[in-house]
Amino acid sequence: MKNYFAIGKPLPRVDALEKVTGKAIYGDDLRFSNLLYGKVLRSKYAHAKILNINIDKAKKLPGVRAIVVGKEMSSVLGGEAIMDYPFLAINKVRYVGEPVAAVAAINEEIAEEALDLIEVTYEELPAIFDPLKAMEKDAPLIHENMNSYKHIPVIKPIENSNICHHVQFGNGDTSKGFSESDHVFEDTFTTQMVQHGSIEPHVAIAQYDPTGKITVWVNNDGPHRLRKDLAKAQGVPLKQIRIINPPYIGGGFGGKGGLKEETICIALAQKTQCRPVKILLSREEVFTSTIVRHPSIVKIKTGVKKDGTILAREVKVIYDTGAYAEKGPTVTIQASTAAAGPYKIPHVKVDGYCVYTNKTIAGAYRGYGIPQVAWAHESQMDIIADKLGIDPIEIRLKNILDEEDICPTTRQVMTSIGLKECIEKIKEDSAWNKVHRQNIGRGIACAFKNTKTPSGSATIVKINSDGSAEILTSSIEEGQGVKTILAQILAEELKVPLDNITVSSPDTDLTPFDASSTSSRTTFHMGNAVKKAAEDAKKQILTIASEIFKVGIRDLRIENGKIYAKQNPSKKLSISELITSRYGAGMDIIGRGSYYTEVPGQIGGVRSSQSIFWMYAAHEAEVKVDPETGRVEVLRIRAAHDVGKAINPLTCEGQIDGGVVHGIGPALFEEMIIGKKGEVLNPSFLDYKIPTALDIPEIIPFIIEKHHKEGPYGAKGIGEMTVVPTAAAISNAIYNAIGVRIKDLPITPEKILKAFINQ
Amino acid sequence: MDHLVNINLKINGEDYNLNVKPNTLLLDLIRDEIGLTGTKRGCDTGECGACTVLIDGIAVNSCLLLAAEVDGKSITTIEGLSKDGQLDPLQETFIEEGAVQCGFCTPGMILSAKALLDKNPDPTEEEIKIAIAGNLCRCTGYKKIIQAISSAVIKMRRRK
C-alpha cells in the first residue's frame, strides 16, 4: 500500500466552515445594484398553437422595463444532441409550463402583475402523454419539423415520427442464444417521472456591458458548455459571453445543466440598458419547467441455461423525454450501453428509443438513464434465480464480467472491474439471504455505469511566492466535494498542507475549459488535470532549485513544502525561499495541466460508446413489509462501491449514504403525477415527497478500490453510481419478504397490497 | 405607497427598529434588508426548512411568517450561532462528521438541531430525527447529520 501524504485520508471538507456558519455564497445570495426582476409566463396547455400574444397592457404597467416573446428571440434552437428547443415558445407550445413570454420589472410583484396582463390566444392541439401511443404510426407529431433539426452525428431520428433517437447495440445472434437456452424469461418493467429535488432552486442573473459582452451569473453545472451554447444561440464569439458560477451550488444531480432560464434572462437583459436581470425559479417552476428523470418502459428477454448461465438477452428500452429532446438522446445511448447489465452474455441486442410526449422535459438525472435499466435487469435476475432455485448472489457471481471480458453491448474490453469484490463484500454477511423473521426479506442488486467519453478538463495551478497555491478550475462545487478532492490532489503533489491551497470557482474569463461537472467525471478528469498542472509547476520549481543547488533535477526531492538535494539534505529551500531567491521582485509559478480522454470508437469526435472508466456497485436491502397495509420499511442497506481509489473516504461515504437515500425515494414513493391535461399535479415538496430523516434505514457503505490505470492515484468516480442499484435491491427484498413482485416504480403500498391479495 | 409597520426586534443579539411593508416575509427581511443570506430560500411555502431560524429559541420557517408578526421577538439566524469566533458544538461536529455536502440545507438543519438540544440536551436518535424531519436534504441521506447531532450532544456534555 502506497504511503500518501494527503490522498486516501478522511479529511474534513475545505468548504465546511463556510457552510456551517452561513457564509457560503449561492446564486440567490449575490447582490447587484440596479437589479431588475424577471418572471416567465408559462403555457397552460400541453399542446397548442399560439395564435397571438398581446403585450400592450403589460407594457403600460409602471415599473415594467422589458418584455420578450418567442418571435424576438434568436432563431437558433437549443439542445444538447438535437437542436429542437426554442428558448421561448414560437408558434406553438408543447408542454404545460413551457416559457411563452417574460417580463423584467423593478420588483417581483410588478413583474408578476405584468404576466397577468399578457394575453395569449391558443388553439389547442391533441396532446400525447403515453410514449407507446406517441410511437404509433399515425400519432400526431409533436415536432412536425423534426426532420429539419440539426443534430450531432450519432443521433438517428426516425422520420415523421415522435421518435427523436433510436440507438442499437448488440453482439452475437440472440435467436441462436434463445434457442440454445433451457429457459427464456420475458418481463416488462416501468419507471415513473422523478424530480431531482435539489434544495436550491435555479437562478440566473444576466447583464450586458456597453460593448455587448454578456455576463451571466448562474448555478449551472457546466459553465464552459453553457458559454458555448449561449454564444451559439446569440451568434457571438465565445469571448463575448462570460459565465460566472457562484462559489457554491445547492445541489444539482443533473438538474442544473443545459439551457434553462439563462437565455430568457439574456433576452430581457438585452432590453434594459445594461441593468442586470435576475430570474429565480419558484419551486413549482423547478418541478414543471426544468427537467426530470425519464419515465421509462424496459422490456427485457433473457435466455439462460439450467445452471444459471446467461446465453442471450434482448432489451428494448423506451425513454419518455417529454416535449423536447434535451439530453434524452445521449441518456438513451449511455443507458443502452449498460442495458444488458454487467454480465458476460454472448448474444445481446439492445434497442433504445427516445420518444417525445407533451410532458415536462426529461434530461440528465443522477445515473443518466441507468437506474431505469438496472432496475429491470436486476429485478429479472432475481426472477431467474428464483425459478432456477439458485441463490441470487451465486447467479450474479456466475455471470458477472471478469477482467478483460468484453462489454456485452459495445464489445469494449473491460478493465478495473471491482464488481466481484463488491458482491463478495455483501456476501460476507453469511446470513444475507436467510432471514427467517416474518415479513422481513433481503435482496441484492448490482450494476455498472459509464462516464461520458471523450471529454476534457484543463486547469492552472498557481504557486504564490509564499508557497501557498491556488487551483484555477471550472469544476463546480455542488456538494459532491470537488474543492476538497482537487485540493487534496494538489497537496499530495506539492506535499503541502491542505490549508495552503485554495480552489477557485468557475469564471469562464479566468478559469480554463472543463466539459462539465457531471457524469461522475470530475475526480478522474479534473483530478488528472490538476495532477498534470502540479507536475508542470514542480518541474519549474525543480529546475530553479537545480540551478541554485547546482545539482541535477533527479537529485532533488520535494517534501513538506521544501526542496532537498538528495545527497546533501542540508541543501534545502522552501518553495517560498526558492521563488523569492530566483525572482526577487516577485513572481508566481504557473503550472498548466489538461486531460482529454482518448478512446477508440469515437463517432464524429463527439461521443464514443466506449467509456474511459466504469463504476461498479452492489447494494443489499433488508426490508420489512406489513402485509395488512402494504407498507415497506427499509431496515438496512449495505452498499459496496468500486471507486478505484477513495481520494477522501469521508466524502466517498457521504456520496454513498446520500445516493442510497436518493435511491429509496424513487423506489418507494416519489412520483410526479401528470393530470389529464398534461399538468403536473404535485409540483411541491408537500405533495411530492422526498425522503426525510424519518425515512432512512441503517446505511453501511463499503469502499472497494480496484485501481484504474489512468485514474489519478487509481481513482474513478462515484456520485451517480450510488443511486443505481437501490430500487431493484429493495424490490428483490420485498419479494424475499412476502413473495410479491412489483414491476412498476414506485413500489407503493397500494401496488403491494393489490398484488398480495391477488396472489 | 404601502402603509409601513414599525417593529422592534433582536436579531443575533442586536436590536433593530425597522419600518416594514405589511406583506414583507421574515425571510426577505433577514436576507434582503438585514443582509444575512445564511438563511436560505428553497420553496417559499414552508416545505423544505432551508429558511429555518430560531424565534425565542423555537425553530420556525421564516418564509411562513410576516416580518410584522415578529415585533418584540428575538431571532437567531445561522450567523448568530458562533460566539466570539467560537463555533457552536453543532457547527464543529457538522464539519468533523462530514454532515455537510452542498450546504444549502445546513443552516436550517443546524438551527433545528440547536432548538432541540437547547430544550432537550440528551435526545434519543428518534427525537433527533423528529426534530429535523422538517428540514429536507437531498445530498447526505441524513446519516452523518444525525451522527453530527449525536456527537454534539456528547461534546456539550463534556464541556459542562
Image (cartoon, helix red, strand yellow):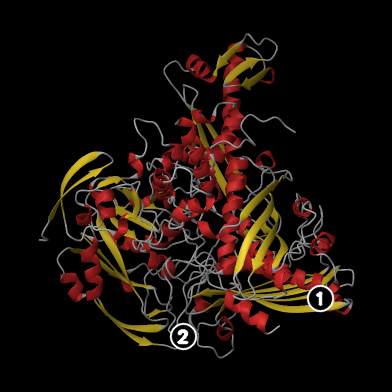
- Decide if residue A569 is in sight here: yes
- Chain assignment, label 1: A
Quarter of the image for residue A233 reads bottom left
Indicate the secondary structure of the residue bearing disc 2. Answer: loop
Task: Give x and y (percent) for residue A42.
Answer: 34, 73
Task: Using the image, determine if residue A290 lies above or below residue A359.
Answer: above
Q: Is residue A121 left or right of residue A237?
A: left
> Dot 1: few (<14), some (14–19), or many (≥20) neighbours within 10 Å?
many
**Amino acid tagged 1:** Thr
Please state the total of marks drawn on the protein image.
2
Please report whichever mark, 2 or 1, sits nearer to the chain's N-terminal start: 2
The tag on residue A127 is 2
Q: Is residue A385 left or right of residue A358?
A: right
Q: Residue drawn 33% across and 45% down?
A: B77
Front position in the image: A424 or A370: A424
Q: Residue drawn 22% across and 70% down?
A: A114
